[in-house]
Image (tube, rainbow, N blue to C red):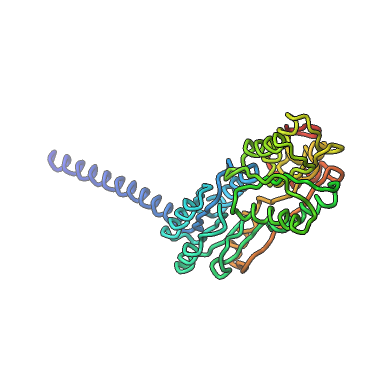
Amino acid sequence: MEFRTRWLRLSMTVGLILVLGLGAAGVLFAGGAGEEEEKSSLINVGIVNLPPEESGYRQANVEDMNNVFSKANGYDAKQTNTGDNSEQIAAAKGYIRDGVDYLLISAANASGWDDTLKSAKDAGIKVILFDRAIDTDESNFQAALLSDMAYEGNTAVEWVLNNVSNPINLILIRGQLGSAAEIGRSKAVLDAEKAGKLKIVADGTGGDSWSLEEARKVVEAAIAAGKDFNVIYAENDGMAQGAVQALDAAGITHGRNGKVKVIGFDFNRFALRNVQAGYWDADMQCNPRQAAEISKWIKSGNLPSGIIYQKELLFTTDKITDQDIENWGINADPGKGVVTK
């Protein structure tokens, strides 16, 4: 009798352990399945972009992409950030091998992408370009939401021609050579020189990183060489800042009522405050916020075809308002009346 009782107790204990064990296993299995189901329900996106250190514009652009293409918004996204075109292409090929649903690209250089884009197309991956154009046939990508760099350059140069006293002697400070931004913004200046409307007295670059320091050196070299100039055309705000540092160090006046007119690009709020204060004269917008519109295309399942350009603005000392800076500026606002040197 005692043996039967012990055997019954042992059987019940083993049974309970098995039930609890299977229950726990069931919970673990269910959790794993849930995670897999959640992952499979996400839209897979590979993003090839430039590094945030490149400029204030790129910092805002990278953050915008990360914020919009998040798990909370239904995406499983990875972003690669490099200013090296070959590294960008390698990253894009990696995303193609991974079988992403969408491949988003802002290219460091406009050329060299044909084979990669064709591979994505053959794999059934939708390619969307953002910010910068790529020199390829439009059949190699689904859509492109771009800044119209030629429009930016033409608008900025038109302002120069209408607001700088003749003869116009200009220092051109280019961004990364061969990038869509540099090509578009520089072409307008080069065309104006060919047409006899202005003279480029110094032509330099901030390099691949659009460097403030390199831009300052371009202007310092022009001053040291005794160049006579009355306008700085810097292809981003950081380089405009470096150029103005060189002017200040040499005691050359600039901005409102100064000898040298200064125009930058990108709409960083520090730059717009400099324009508002008359420390600079003008700034041309390059809108970094493409992510929300691209996400809208993807979620709707109705992707456009071809190139769509963003509307962009130019603000000048005599017209800019606090509301403009709040609505259109990017990155931190130093505050009204604060000049960033």
Depth order, front residue of 119/225? 225
The image position of residue 184, as x and y in percent, is 67, 56
Name above or below for residue 158 compared with residue 210. Answer: below
Q: Position of residue 6 (x, y in %)?
A: 16, 39
Q: In the picture, which quadrant includes the N terminus?
A: top left
**28 and 39: which one is in front?**
39
In this picture, residue 231 sits left or right of residue 102: right
Q: Answer left or right for 341 relative to 34.
A: right
Question: Is 100 on the left-hand or right-hand side of 202?
Answer: left
* Residue 311 in view here: no
Image spot of residue 3 (x, y percent): 12, 40
Instruction: Tell me the quarter of the picture where residue 109 sits.
Output: bottom right
Q: Position of residue 320 (x, y in %)?
A: 83, 44
Asked where in the image residue 256 lies, by quadrant, the reply is top right
Q: Nearer the viewer, residue 198 or 304?
A: 198
Residue closest to the far front: 225
Q: Nearer the viewer, residue 22 or 188?
A: 188
Q: Residue at x 60, y 45 (%)?
A: 63
Q: Is residue 97 visible?
A: yes
